[in-house]
Image (cartoon, helix red, strand yellow):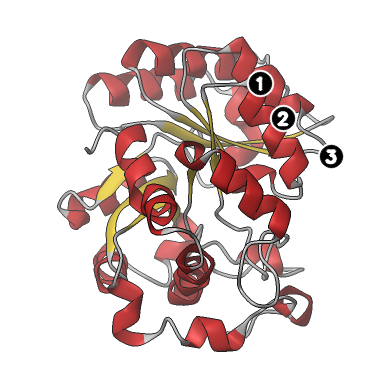
Amino acid sequence: MTAPGPFMRGLAAGAILAWSGAAITAQPFADVHVHFNWDQRELIDAGRIVEKLAAAGVEFAVAAGTPSELALELARAAGGRVVPLFSPYIHELGRRDWHLDPRVVARAEAGLRAGDYHGIGEIHFMAGFPPRADNPVFVQLMTLAGEYRVPVLIHIDSGNEAAFLAICRRYPSLDILFAHAGGNLQAIHIRRIIKGCPNAWMEFSARDPWRYDGLAGEDGRLRPEWRALVLDYPDRFVTGTDPVWRVTRTQSWDLADDGWDHFEQLIAWHRTWLADLPADVRRKISVENARRLFGRE
């Protein structure tokens, strides 16, 4: 499938092609944000995903499923290459009602207690709309994360950093990843979060030209403000692909999600901007920080 026109802005085709073939596996890479969802499973099975991860040189991937047990299915197929997260979306449409469903907390506790899951997320919020971050189910999930000492992946769409700052300050003992480095947020917003929350980690999935954009220029290199931020705080960033594609299309409710068809394109784009960083910083963002965050050192 060809991505829609508006999402092609900023694509450095030559730079991405330079990372094709064997070069894509040249450096270790931890993909901290992938999904195996019911509407992806219609098009691809767990075994094929594992093959894609291996071919792309992914040392390990951090996966969430909708329903949540699909992350376990992927982890079983991966033989240690996948770190499964507990998703509060315990059924196909769970993103709509997870915050009202007490079964979410019970299943999270059972899965964490059994050692099946090694984190919680992705949990979505939109500032100004329900659910709020003080809803009882979310509060109990955060309590479980503290009890079992696992990180939490949170996605907030907002016009500034305030909503995420409120969460990471409320739970200072938890490792909390900010999905997509805030989506539409700018480097100045992320700098404030890093300064204000020592427990916050930024991940760069979906900041590619086809979705949130804004991270790199047409030459495939980080924009100056992002590069300065990464160089100032190289221990606070990780990255990933988030191969979910229906978000780039309108009227897609009846279509399966072919995001994994774009995985190679996404990881090549990330390797392009990473290649322009100093070697020690590139290693940290590509894999070393993720190893530390998910206990794989």
Left or right position of 257 against 291? right
Q: Name the residue under label 3.
A: 159
Residue 148 to residue 67: above or below: above
User: In which quarter of the view is residue 6 placed?
Assistant: bottom right
Residue at image point 50% right, 17% down: 142
User: In which quarter of the view is residue 51 placed?
Assistant: bottom left
Q: Mark 2 points at which residue?
A: 192
* CA separation in Å, label 2 and label 1: 6 Å
Could you say which is closer to the camera, residue 19 or residue 168?
19
Contact flag, marks 2 and 1 (Cβ < 8 Å): yes
* CA separation in Å, label 2 and label 3: 14 Å
Residue at image point 37% right, 70% down: 44
**Is disc 2 placed on a helix, strand or loop?**
helix
Image quarter hosting the C terminus = top left
**Is disc 1 placed on a helix, strand or loop?**
helix
Q: Mark 1 points at which residue?
A: 196
- Three-letter amino acid code of the residue under disc 1: Gly
Could you say which is closer to the camera, residue 83 or residue 237?
237
Could you say which is closer to the camera, residue 198 or residue 171?
198
Residue 249, given in percent of the width and then of the height, sits at 71, 70
Residue at image point 40% right, 85% down: 20
Residue 64, given in percent of the width and then of the height, sits at 42, 45
- Three-letter amino acid code of the residue under disc 2: Arg
Mark yes or no: residue 93 visible. Answer: no
